[in-house]
Amino acid sequence: MNLTLPSHATNAANPWRPRYHYTPQRHWMNDPNGLVHFDGEYHLYYQYNPQGSDWGHISWGHAISTDLVSWQELPVAIPATERVMAFSGSVVVDHANCAGFAPEGSAAPALLAFFTGFDPETKIQSQHLAYSLDRGRSYTPYAGNPVIDIGSTEFRDPKVFLHAPTRRWVMLVVAALEQQVWFYTSVNLIDWTRVSTFGPAGSADKNIWEVPELFELPIDGDATNKRWVLIVSVNHGSLWGGSGVQYFIGSFDGNHFTPDNSDTTLTLWAEHGRDFYAPITFANLPDERVLWLGWVSNWEYARELPSNPWRGQQSGVRELSLVSTPQGPRLRQRMVCEMHALLEPEPLLSLRALPAGEAVQALSQATVTGRQLMARLAVATQGLQAPIGLEFFKGGGESVRVGFDPAANCFFIDRRCSAPVFKGQSERHDGPRLLDTPEIELEVWVDGSLVELLADGGSVALTDLVYAAADASGVGLFHGDEAAQVRSLDLHAVRATMHHVSEVL
Ligand code: FRU
């Protein structure tokens, strides 16, 4: 594909660079790995090529944060070696020293990273273990690696966690081509026994399964009413083609995951945008929250994205729960409160209870601009006939629309009108509305080239990349009926947390 890079692509102040979402200073990044909280620090490891802006030499890049929003990039934590690239995986804190890596008498536990070792020569993927005794800065490979090797070339992405009721460690690994999650258990984190298999299930497309996740969530905030949620990232055959995230709700007894719905073809998508993949949750959090983030990209075009000198960005950290809907419980994702603390306290604009026509006027009088924004829009659904929503990156006759379409009963991000610089940019992505409340609510986080929509309290999520012209930073409101009732509109600038030294290579 022939991509013409606008001249601003390498400017010192790159307008596509997210300022409050994580991007590495330079080079390629894909999946988040080993998210963990330890000793006051949140760790974000990620698939990283320390040598260039294309996928390769895959190592675990590393960043830390004390607040989940300001990330500091650190040296690579698990470097690729000639025979072992470090593919995706997870980190656990071995508080009870089950594996015995912490020196005797040491008060500090070891951090254990489980990842897929990919051998570029044989193409074999096997599960490896490495431990850290320096607060997650560096990892020493376990001398007996691999800990699981079935001689497969499509067997990866170990997720390890402690299952408290059975007091055993559990590992999920995907058999990617079989569309299966394999479950293992262990008492010492080194010797693993296979105990069950889940899948194929859900989307019947000819896709592969990657990056499994499993966690328990309360329904409607009721801690006595919890369900387990199994996550599988699927590639090629997702909603809009390419990568996507499926989930299953059910029970887990420490060995088997059993979905609540006996219809194994039922497909639930965690996200309805095109750019949210391989999300995983944080381990060892100091509170009861379940938090995750995902890679904001899609294998369909990840290698062609025009950002420079970095390629790859992570989503905001989202708090997960389950919400009751007429169709049953569904995943809900809300931006963590730490992110809300980044909003400039004085809103750029705040409107209450007025018809859409007047809201448009108020917005144009206020001449709000920005590429680091959070907007919240609530609109009455009664009598709503035509699509309504917000426009971002407005300029030169173009904009990106984020809204609600009453005829289709869905939320959408429409990036058709933005400069088409990569495959898939000229699309509208729809996420069906799940709740039946008297008003729709959009919460939109915009950051350089990234749009996250968490609608109706996070019961519908859409994330899309958008590469708009450098000077396109206007904000507007679109509607098909001036009388549509805008209940509220609040627009805030979001403070930058990521400061990159220079954008020029
Ligand atoms: C998912 C994935 C994983 C693999 C990693 C390689 O995006 O394909 O299955 O471990 O990326 O970088």
Image: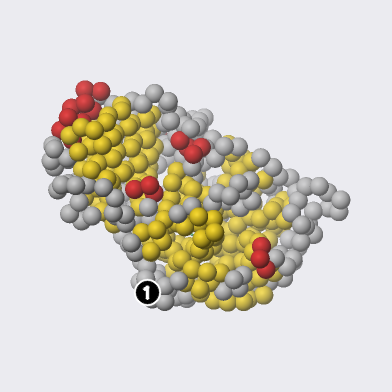
Q: What element carries label 1?
A: loop
Look at mark 1 in the image and give the residue it sits on: 265
Between residue 293 and residue 338, name the one nearer to us.
Answer: 338
Residue visible at 20% across and 38% down in the picture:
485
Above or below: residue 419 compared with residue 164: above
Rendered location of residue 245, percent (x, y): 42, 60
Amino acid type shown at disc 1: Thr
Residue visible at 40% across and 58% down in the picture:
324
Between residue 215 and residue 26, name the one nearer to us.
Answer: 215
Residue 457 visible, this angle: yes
In the picture provided, is 253 more to the left or to the right than 479?
A: right
**Residue most extreme to the right:** 105
In the picture provided, is 180 more to the left or to the right than 327?
A: right
Residue visible at 42% across and 53% down in the picture:
332
Residue 11 visible, this angle: no
Say which quarter of the image contains residue 187: bottom right
Rendered location of residue 351, percent (x, y): 27, 29
